[in-house]
Image (cartoon, rainbow, N blue to C red):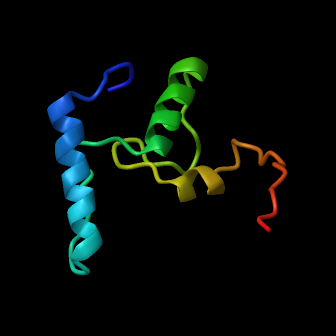
């Protein structure tokens, strides 16, 4: 999946499904044909280090919470800007 671009049709279809969910409170987003950014990070980490992140599912969706909870990554202090 890494290194592949979305087709124009795939991107439009994904966008329509997500926008449709904004007006339908009972709609659930479908991620079968899309890749969550945390999964992309997980795949890139595994490709570079040849190791998997602990406590992250290998064959399922890797969520941002998995990356936050793994002891293999360190938090980086980022300065937040205050909105005035």
Q: Position of residue 77 (x, y in %)?
A: 84, 49
Residue farthest to the front? 84
Q: Is residue 54 left or right of residue 4?
A: right
- Looking at the rendering, in which quadrant would you find the C terminus? bottom right
Residue 6 appears in which quarter of the rendering?
Answer: top left
- Looking at the rendering, in which quadrant would you find the N terminus? top left
Vertical order, 71 against 50 (above or below): below
Residue at 81%, 63% in the rendered image:
82
Residue at 51%, 48% in the rendered image:
56
Residue at 20%, 42% in the rendered image:
12
> Viewer-proximal residue, 27 or 75?
27
> Viewer-proximal residue, 55 or 5?
5
Vertical order, 16 against 45 (above or below): below
> Viewer-proximal residue, 26 or 71?
26
Vertical order, 10 against 16 (above or below): above
> Viewer-proximal residue, 75 or 25?
25
- Can residue 3 be seen in this snapshot? yes
Vertical order, 20 against 68 (above or below): below
Q: In this view, does 19 lie to the left or right of 40?
A: left
Q: Where is residue 11 in the image (x, y as percent from the top left)?
A: 24, 38
Q: Position of residue 45 (x, y in %)?
A: 57, 29
Q: In this view, does 82 lie to the left or right of 12?
A: right
Q: Across the whole image, how many numbered discs are drawn on residues?
A: 0
Q: Position of residue 10 (x, y in %)?
A: 18, 36
Q: Is residue 10 left or right of residue 60?
A: left
Residue 34 appears in which quarter of the rendering?
Answer: top left
Residue at 77%, 44% in the rendered image:
74
């Amino acid at each position: 999946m890494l290194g592949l671009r979305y087709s124009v049709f795939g991107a439009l279809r994904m966008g329509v499904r997500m926008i449709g969910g904004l007006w339908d409170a009972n709609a659930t987003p479908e991620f079968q044909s899309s890749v969550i950014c945390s999964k992309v990070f997980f795949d890139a980490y595994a490709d570079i280090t040849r190791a998997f992140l602990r406590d992250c599912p290998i064959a399922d969706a890797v969520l941002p919470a998995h990356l936050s909870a793994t002891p293999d990554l360190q938090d980086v202090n980022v300065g937040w800007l205050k909105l005035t």
